[in-house]
Image (spheres, helix red, strand yellow):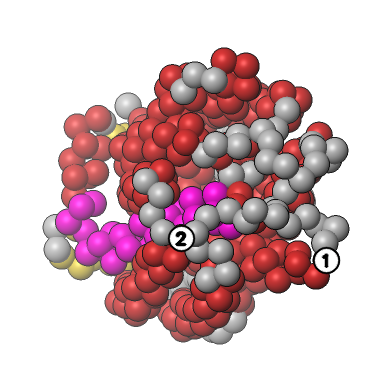
C-alpha cells in the first residue's frame, strides 16, 4: 500500500520556526538538493565532459541511449513507485545506480569493453526514473504553495553545485594532460563514485511525508492509500490528459539538447582540462538561471497566471537569443571537431565559445525551472504531482535517448542545433496556453481534470500562490 499526500489541516501544535527544524519543507528540500548534488549532479559533470570522459563518444552514446530508453519507461513508472514505496526507499533504489555507472567507465579505461557501461546505463535509467519521480513529488508538494518557485530555485542551486564541483575534479586531475585529446584518468572516476555513494547513504535521512510540517503549522500531507492497480490505471490516463499533452513538447526538448551541447560544443571545441573548467561555469550558470526565474515566478506579479505567462515570454526571448548565437558559432565548425582545440589560456579564442556554453547552462535551468513551476501549479496533491513529474521525466528521457543515437549516427551539427532550437520554440506557445487555461489565481482551489471533466478540489489548508 502507499500514501496519498494532499494538503492537510494545521497541526495541533504550532510548528517551531527556524532554519534547522528537521521536519520542515526547507530542511527536506535542502537534504534532497544535497542528495542530488552527489548523484545526478556528479553524473552531469561526468556527462558534460563529452563522451563520458572518453576520447571516443561511441561508448557513452550507446550507454546513454540505454540509460534514457530505460529512463523513459521508469520515469513514467517512477511516480507509481513513489506512491507505493514512499520517497525514502524510492530515492535509495535510484541513488545506488549512479556509482555503478561511473564505475563502468573506470572499468572501460582498462578493458575497453562496451558491455558494462551499456548495462550500467540501462540500470541507471531505471534508477534515475525512481529518483527523479520522488524528487519531483517532494519539490512540488512539500513547500508552501506561495513559495514553490523559491524552493525549486534552492533545490536547483544545490543540485547544480554538484556539477560545479564535479567540473573541478577533471580540471584539477587532468590539468597537465596537454592539448591532445585524451580520456580522463582513474582518479576522476573514483572521485565521482565516492560522491555518488555518499548521496545514496544520505537518502536514509529523508523523512516520511506525513511528518512534514510547514512553519505556519499546516501539514503537507495526510494519509490515504493507493494500490498497484490504481497507479497503473492513473498512469495510462496521463497519455490522454490534455495538460500533459501540452507539456509533452517541452518535456521532449528539455534534455534533447544535452547531447549536442556536451559532445558537440564542449566536447568538440576545447582541451580536456578546459572542458572540466567549462562545466564549472555551465552548472554555475544553472544556479543563476534557476534563482532568477524562481524569484520572478514567486514575486513578479500579484497574479499567479500573469507570472507564469511572463515567465514563458522571458524564457522564450532569452532562448531565442542564445540559440541564435549558437548557430553563429556552429557555422564555424560544421564538419566536426576543431583540429586545434581551444584552451582557456587562449583568451582571444576562448571568450566567445565560453560565453555561449555558459549561456546554454543558464537557459537550461530557466527552462526546466519554469516547467517544474507550471507542473506544481496544476495540483496540490503530491500523488498527482508525482505522476505528472514521472510523465515529464519519462518523455524527457525518451527524447534524450533519441538525441544520443542521432549523435552516434553523425548527423550534421547544424541540423542538430536547428532541431533543438525548433523543439524549444514549439514548446513556448503550448506552455503559455497551459498556463492560461489551467493555472488559476484563486487561493483556495486547484483546478484538476479527470476523464475530461473540470473539477475544483477545495483544500482545507491555505493554497495561495501569491
Residue 370 visible in this rendered orientation of the protein: yes
For residue 363, side relative to residue 238 (left or right): right
Query: Which secondary structure class fits the magenta region best?
Result: helix
The residue closer to the viewer here, 120 or 181, is 181
Left or right of 140 in this view: 126: left
Disc 1 marks which residue? 347
Q: Judge whether residue 200 is colored magenta.
A: no
Depicted 422 relative to depicted 185: above or below? below
**Residue under the point 41% across and 43% down:** 408
10 Å neighbourhood of mark 1: few (<14), some, or many (≥20)? few
Residue 330 is left or right of residue 156, and the answer is: left
From this viewpoint, which residue is outermost toward the front?
339
Q: Which residue is mark 2?
A: 413
- Residue displayed at 66% across by 33% down: 183
- Location of residue 329 by image quarter: bottom right
Tell me the CA gap for discs 1 and 2.
Answer: 25 Å
> Is residue 89 among what the camera can see?
no
Tell which of 202 and 50 is nearer to you. Answer: 50
Q: Which residues are magenta?
A: 238-266
Which disc is residue 330 wearing? none
Q: How far from the left and from the top, in percent, is residue 337? A: 58, 53
Where does the image place residue 311, in percent across and percent down from the top left?
A: 51, 77
How would you rate the neighbour count of disc 2 (Cα within 10 Å): few for under 14, some for 14-19, many for 20 or more?
many
Percent x, y of residue 22: 69, 39
Residue 61 coordinates in the image, percent (x, y) = 45, 39
Residue occupying image coordinates x 56% and y 64%: 333
Amino acid at each position: 500500500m502507499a500514501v496519498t499526500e494532499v494538503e492537510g489541516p494545521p497541526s495541533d501544535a504550532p510548528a517551531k520556526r527556524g532554519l534547522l527544524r528537521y521536519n520542515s519543507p526547507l530542511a527536506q528540500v535542502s537534504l534532497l538538493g544535497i542528495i542530488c548534488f552527489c548523484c545526478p549532479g556528479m553524473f552531469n559533470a561526468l556527462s558534460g565532459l563529452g563522451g563520458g570522459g572518453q576520447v571516443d563518444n561511441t561508448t557513452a552514446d550507446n550507454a546513454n541511449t540505454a540509460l534514457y530508453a530505460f529512463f523513459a519507461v521508469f520515469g513514467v513508472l517512477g511516480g507509481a513507485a513513489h506512491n507505493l514505496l514512499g520517497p525514502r526507499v524510492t530515492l535509495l533504489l535510484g541513488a545506488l545506480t549512479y556509482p555503478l555507472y561511473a564505475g563502468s567507465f573506470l572499468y572501460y579505461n582498462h578493458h575497453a569493453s562496451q558491455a558494462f557501461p551499456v548495462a550500467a546505463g540501462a540500470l541507471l535509467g531505471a534508477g534515475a526514473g525512481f529518483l527523479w519521480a520522488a524528487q519531483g513529488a517532494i519539490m512540488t508538494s512539500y513547500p508552501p504553495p506561495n513559495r514553490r518557485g523559491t524552493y525549486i530555485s534552492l533545490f536547483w542551486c544545490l543540485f547544480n553545485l554538484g556539477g560545479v564541483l564535479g567540473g573541478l575534479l577533471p580540471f584539477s586531475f587532468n590539468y597537465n594532460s596537454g592539448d591532445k585529446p585524451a580520456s580522463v584518468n582513474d582518479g576522476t572516476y573514483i572521485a565521482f563514485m565516492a560522491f555518488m555513494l555518499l548521496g545514496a547513504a544520505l537518502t536514509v535521512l529523508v523523512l516520511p511525508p506525513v511528518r512534514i510540517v510547514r512553519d505556519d503549522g499546516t501539514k503537507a500531507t495526510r494519509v490515504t492509500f493507493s494500490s498497484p492497480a490504481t497507479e497503473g490505471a492513473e498512469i495510462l490516463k496521463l497519455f490522454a490528459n490534455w495538460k500533459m499533452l501540452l507539456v509533452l513538447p517541452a518535456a521532449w526538448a528539455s534534455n534533447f539538447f544535452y547531447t549536442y551541447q556536451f559532445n558537440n560544443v564542449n566536447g568538440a571545441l576545447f582541451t580536456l582540462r578546459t572542458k572540466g573548467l567549462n562545466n564549472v561555469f555551465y552548472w554555475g550558470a544553472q544556479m543563476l538561471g534557476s534563482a532568477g526565474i524562481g524569484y520572478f515566478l514567486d514575486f513578479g506579479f500579484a497574479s499567479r497566471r500573469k507570472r507564469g505567462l511572463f515567465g514563458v515570454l522571458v524564457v522564450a526571448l532569452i532562448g531565442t537569443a542564445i540559440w541564435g548565437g549558437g548557430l553563429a558559432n556552429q557555422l564555424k565548425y560544421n564538419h566536426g571537431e576543431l583540429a586545434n582545440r581551444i584552451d582557456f589560456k587562449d583568451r582571444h579564442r576562448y571568450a566567445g565559445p565560453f560565453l555561449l556554453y555558459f549561456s546554454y547552462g543558464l537557459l537550461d535551468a530557466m527552462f526546466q525551472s519554469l516547467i517544474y513551476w507550471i507542473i506544481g501549479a496544476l495540483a496540490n496533491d503530491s500523488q498527482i504531482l508525482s505522476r505528472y513529474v514521472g510523465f515529464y521525466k519519462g518523455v524527457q528521457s525518451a527524447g534524450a535517448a533519441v538525441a544520443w543515437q542521432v549523435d552516434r549516427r553523425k548527423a550534421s551539427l547544424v541540423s542538430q542545433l536547428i532541431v533543438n532550437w525548433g523543439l524549444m520554440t514549439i514548446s513556448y506557445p503550448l506552455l503559455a496556453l497551459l498556463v492560461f487555461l489551467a493555472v488559476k489565481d484563486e487561493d483556495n482551489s486547484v483546478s484538476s481534470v479527470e476523464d475530461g471533466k473540470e473539477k475544483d478540489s477545495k483544500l482545507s489548508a491555505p493554497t495561495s500562490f501569491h
